[in-house]
Amino acid sequence: MRFYAALHLLAGIAFCLTARAHDPAHHHAAEAAAPASAKVALSDAPLLDASGKRVRLAQAIGARIAVVNFIYTSCTTVCPVSSATFQQLQQKLGPRLGKDVVLVSITVDPLRDTPQRLREYAGRYEAREGWVWLTGAKPDVERALKGFGVYTANFEDHPAMVLVGDAGAGKWTRFFGFPSVDELLARIDTTHVARKE
C-alpha cells in the first residue's frame, strides 16, 4: 500500500515539475501560495461517506478542526500528491486524528466516484478513522464545493487547494497548491490555540 501511494506521489511530482518547465500557468499551481483567510459556507446538502452512509458536512466535521481537500479517484496528477500529503498528515496527527482533528476529502467527480470507489481509493493511502471521504448526488456535491469556493464546471480543472478551519467559529484558512505537512500542522495548532483565546 505504501509503495502504491509513494508511486502516485512521485508521478504527481514529476507532472508538476514537467508542467513547471513548460507552462507558466502551471508553475503557479505547482507551488503552495501563502495561506489566506477564506470565507466558507458549509452546505447542508446530504452527502455520502465511503461506507454509503448519508452525512452532512457539519455532522462529518463536528466540533473538530477540519482539514479539507478535493480529489477525484481517476486523477493521476495533483490528486495523488494531495492524498499522499494527507496520508503523511494522519501519521503525524497520531491520536489527535478523529478526536481533535478530522481530515475530509471531497470528490469533484461524484458521477464516477461512488462510495465503493472512494473506499478503494482511501485504502491506497491507508486512511484511518478520522479521515472522511465524501461523495453524493452531483447537485449536492456541487453545493458543497461552491460553499468551499472550489467548484469548477469541468472537474478536471479543479484547483489544487487545502482548507483548514474551525467550522464552529467560521474561521478558515485556504492554501493554494501543495502545502507541506508541517505547514498544515502549524495551521492546525494555530487554529487550536485561537479557540482558547
Image (spheres, rainbow, N blue to C red):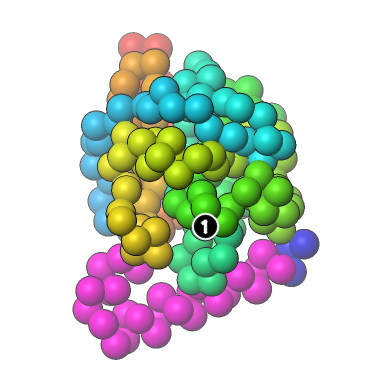
Indicate the secondary structure of the residue bearing disc 1. loop
Who is closer to the viewer here, 23 or 110?
110
Q: Which residue shows up at 55% across the image and 77% down it?
A: 11
Is 191 situated above or below 177?
above
Residues drawn in magenta = 4-31
In x, y percent, where is residue 16?
41, 75
Residue 70 lies left or right of residue 121; in this view the side is left
Please indicate, yes or no, whether residue 101 appears anywhere in the rendered image.
no
Who is closer to the viewer here, 93 or 13?
13
Q: Main secondary structure of the magenta part?
A: helix
Residue extending farthest bottom: 22
Looking at the rendered image, the quarter that the C terminus falls into is top left
Who is closer to the viewer here, 53 or 195?
53
Q: Which residue shows up at 62% across the image and 36% down it?
A: 49
Disc 1 marks which residue?
72
Residue extending farthest right: 1
12 drawn magenta = yes
Who is closer to the viewer here, 105 or 86?
105
In x, y percent, where is residue 168?
39, 16
Q: Which residue shows up at 41% across the image and 23% down it?
A: 44
22 drawn magenta = yes
Q: Which residue shows up at 77% across the image and 62% down it?
A: 1
In x, y percent, where is residue 181?
50, 50
Q: Type of residue at label 1? A: Tyr
Please indicate, yes or no, whether residue 6 appears anywhere in the rendered image.
yes
Is 133 situated above or below 56?
below
Q: Quadrant of residue 143?
A: top left
In x, y percent, where is residue 69?
46, 46
